[in-house]
Image (spheres, helix red, strand yellow):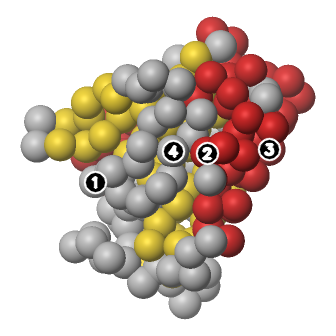
Amino acid sequence: MGIVYVAEPAHSSGHGEPHMIASWWLNAYAALHDDVATGAEATVDLDGENEVQPDLCLFWHPPRTAQGIHLTADDYIEDAPHLVVEIAGSSAPVDPGRKLTAYQRNGVLECVVWLTGERRSERRRLDRDGYVLVQAEGEGMVESAVFPDLRPNVLAMLSGDRRAMRTALS
């Protein structure tokens, strides 16, 4: 039997507002790509034993990779999304820990954890040895290895600067 993660109460500035900023970023990207699907707090059946509800996820639909991700007949996501975003305020001890391990074990290719209480984010890419931390470049941009031209301005994201976030889609 797997683990069920129950979220703690979510604060507006520590979770709600960052969730909206990240949602805007992923939805704006998906609007430019007909073969990209998004999910917000949708149930994801990773492996038959572990179900999670990432704050946000992004995946090619239909898949472009060997991953068999698909939507079930009852509209749940099955298998690992290509990218997940976790907004970690009050749940910071859980999100980067066991949940991240489940994402890694099941092949989530990229994972962004926004640690709102610490005003920082961590971006990980999956390689042969597991997750590797990816550092932002010069102007705070981080290019996705899975989704071409998806490069959030991390500094703008962390400060809540929506205007600067637009450059992530230019």
Q: Which residue reaches farthest left?
A: 128
Per the image, label 4 sits on a secondary structure element best described as: loop
Q: CA distance from mark 1 to mark 2?
A: 25 Å
**Among the two numbered marks 1 and 2 on one chain, the one whose residue lies closer to the N terminus:** 1
- Between disc 1 and disc 3, the foreground one is 3
Query: Which residue is found at the position 57% from the left and 48% from the top?
Result: 54
Which residue corresponds to mark 3? Answer: 20
Say which of 25 and 57 sits in front: 25
Per the image, label 2 sits on a secondary structure element best described as: helix
Q: CA distance from mark 4 to mark 2?
A: 5 Å
Q: Amino acid at mark 1?
A: Gly
**Among the two numbered marks 2 and 3 on one chain, the one whose residue lies closer to the N terminus:** 3
Say which of 32 and 132 sits in front: 32
Circles 2 and 3 in contact, beta carbons < 8 Å: no
Query: Which residue is found at the position 42% from the left and 26% from the top?
Result: 137
Circles 4 and 3 in contact, beta carbons < 8 Å: no
Q: Is residue 24 visible?
A: yes
Which residue corresponds to mark 4? Answer: 151
Vertical relation: 18 (above or below) 92: below
Residue 7 is situated, as x and y percent measured from the top left of the image, at 68, 35
Which residue corresponds to mark 1? Answer: 107
Q: Amino acid at mark 4?
A: Arg
Q: Is residue 51 visible?
A: no
Circles 4 and 2 in contact, beta carbons < 8 Å: yes
Callout 1 environment at 10 Å: few (<14), some (14 to 19), or many (20+)?
A: many
**Among the two numbered marks 1 and 3 on one chain, the one whose residue lies closer to the N terminus:** 3
